[in-house]
Amino acid sequence: MNGKIVILGYGPVGRAATEILARRGADLRVAQRSAPKILPAGVKFVACDILDADSVRAACEGAAQVVLAIGFAYDGAVWRKSWPRAVDNTLEACAANGARLVFFDNLYMYGPQNAPMTEATPLADYGVKPAVRAAITRVWMAASQAGRVKVAAVRAPDFYGPGVGLTVLGDSAFGALAKGKTALYVGSADLPHDFAYVPDCGRAVVSLLDAPDDAFGRAWHVPCAPTRTAREILTLAAVALGRPLRLQALPLWALRPLSLFVPDLRGVVEMRFNWDRPYYVDASDFRARFWSDPTPFEIGVPATAKSFMET
């Protein structure tokens, strides 16, 4: 890996990738609106508004590779307005600098599925947020196919990890257990569901940064530990914390009426298909090309649960 790397967004995955790269001594810059409280030694920061094209181009100046690892408020109207602009601005900045782009993405663009999802699963124009993800996928794929920017997407399902609060296994689940409270989970806690470990997501991003150009022009799925149910995962957390498991599953039928009083649930209603059926992710392409040893739940879950004791 040669040349400057710019990480756009210092959320859980941007931070995980940054930590790996910093340990290597990479020429590294983190860019987002506000400076993180702490950055690894040697990592530079530049203020950047992802919705401002000039700001993104300035942040990416001189970059050989760019990682897009941002997030927006979990609101369909925000996604419709912000995601296309963010992707356009990033592609323009990469094109201007001749930089490759690694885009950390999710799996929403597949819509409701009953079979394991692969990178060849068709895009689905379903609902608002899945349709937005499908639309921006078509944009970066077109840019890649036209030879304008070399792009690779790294896609992951719901993730978890130390200190990661804004996920279905975050503050309301691991965080609650760490405080001696009842864990809350959306939907049935007894359906098999794939979850990715955030340090593995960062490792997957770095794997693409390390890869030759022939790994670009497509999406890759992050490998997950063998599928478990949320109840099994949270049982591991309770054992690690030395506490009995107290778990309340929020019925999916309750999402819509509750969303009238709990604004944070409004964005979840259309995504209920993520939790109303078994949820499997096929990462066999990535496993064959890169690595096939994702962090076992027996390691990731205790580390995550105990991290919430420290917050």
Image (tube, grey):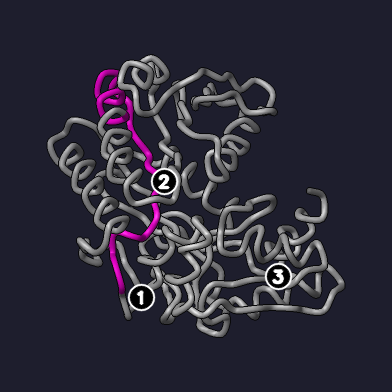
Q: Residue furthest bottom?
A: 190
Where residue 178 sits in the image (x, y, percent)? 79, 62
Q: Where is 180 relative to 136, above or below? A: below
Q: Is residue 99 magenta?
A: yes
Which residue corresponds to the image point at 40% horizontal and 30% vertical from the top-left? 66
Q: Which element carries disc 1, helix, strand or loop?
A: loop
Count residues near mark 3 (Cα–Cα under 10 Å), then give few for <14, some for 14-19, many for 20+.
few
Which residue corresponds to the image point at 42% horizontal and 58% vertical from the top-left? 267
* In this picture, residue 98 sits left or right of residue 298: left
Which residue corresponds to the image point at 35% horizontal and 39% vertical from the top-left? 212
What amino acid is found at the position of numbered circle 3 in the picture?
A: Glu
Give the image quarter of residue 257. bottom left
- Marks 3 and 1 sit apart, C-alpha to C-alpha, by 23 Å
Q: Where is 111 relative to 221, above or below? A: below
What amino acid is found at the position of numbered circle 1 in the picture?
A: Pro
Where residue 17 sits in the image (x, y, percent)? 55, 40
Q: What range of the chain is rendered magenta?
A: 90-112
Give the image quarter of residue 172. bottom right
Per the rendering, the mark at residue 104 is 2
Q: Provide the residue designation for mark 3.
A: 298
Per the rendering, the mark at residue 116 is 1
